[in-house]
Image (cartoon, grey):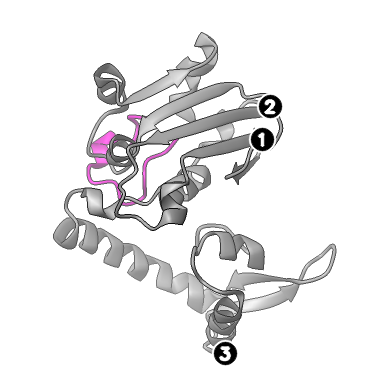
Amino acid sequence: MAGKSHFNELMRGLPLISRTLLAQRLRELENAGLITRLPKPNGRGFEYHLTPAGKSVQPIIMQLGEWGRQWLYPAVMKRDLDPFLLMWDIHQRLHTDALPSQRTVIEFELCRIPRSLPPDSRNMKRWWLVVEKPDVELCLTDPGYEVDMVVKADLFALTRVWMGEHKLQDAQREGTITLLGPPALVKVFPGWLKLSMFARKPEHRAVL
């Protein structure tokens, strides 16, 4: 539903799942008629795509998400913070039409990650978005390219902005989010991003 069809892409989007368990879940979904497995056009392996039955479940999933956002998690709590899930969602939800034609590298430096998170998550402080229109790659290790812009952000502040609870401009004024780079890039960068599909306030979808 998020546009990923390769096994390794699904693995990256499901932290902590084992390859064996993911393969089992995919077989179950295929047996249930919700996905279909097709050979890759070029190379070894398979692609996984929703069937018409699978696509018909999407509105139900979205409604459950909206319900949970309204009634179970009306506001982001620090106990809910997860740098991996946040960065994974951000990299998936870019306005591809607004991306530059040349390769652009954005480094994220996250701070104030709760100590209650597992050690692996606490160490996820630096991330890189490698933008090569229309593709966007999320990297947890330095990809080796020159960085064009740096986003320094308090994890809680960035999550609140992403979930539509706070405006990016206000976070910048407060100093919890800082954009460092060429003025032209700093100016257009917020327009690349969308909010979470479960952002609380629809009127804030154009904030970033």
Estimate the x, y position of residue 114 in percent, counting from the top left: 30, 47
In the drawing, what numbered circle is on residue 31? 3
Question: Which of disc 2 and disc 1 is earlier in sequence?
Answer: 2
Relative depth, front residue between 65 and 44? 44
Residue plotted at (57% across, 84% down): 24
Question: Which of disc 3 and disc 2 is earlier in sequence?
Answer: 3
Type of amino acid under label 3: Asn
Q: Residue furthest top?
A: 183
In the drawing, what numbered circle is on residue 133? 1
Tag 2 near tag 3, CB within 8 Å: no
**Residue 94 seen in this snapshot:** yes
Estimate the x, y position of residue 183 in percent, counting from the top left: 50, 10
Q: Secondary structure at mark 2?
A: loop
Q: Hey, which quadrant is residue 132 in on the image?
A: top right
Q: Secondary structure at mark 1?
A: loop
Estimate the x, y position of residue 29 in percent, counting from the top left: 53, 82
Question: Which of disc 3 and disc 1 is earlier in sequence?
Answer: 3
- Report the magenta residues as a range: 193-208
Residue plotted at (65% across, 63% down): 8
Q: CA distance from mark 2 to mark 3?
A: 41 Å
**Residue 99 seen in this snapshot:** no
Mark 1 is surrounded, within 10 Å at the Cα level, by few (under 14), some (14 to 19) or many (20 or more) other residues, namely some
Type of amino acid under label 2: Ser
Q: Secondary structure at mark 3?
A: helix
Mark 2 is surrounded, within 10 Å at the Cα level, by few (under 14), some (14 to 19) or many (20 or more) other residues, namely few
Type of amino acid under label 1: Lys
Residue plotted at (55% across, 85% down): 33
Q: CA distance from mark 1 to mark 2?
A: 6 Å
Residue 2 falls within the magenta-colored stretch: no
In the drawing, what numbered circle is on residue 101? 2
Tag 1 near tag 2, CB within 8 Å: yes
Q: Horizontally, is 123 left or right of 82 in the view?
A: right
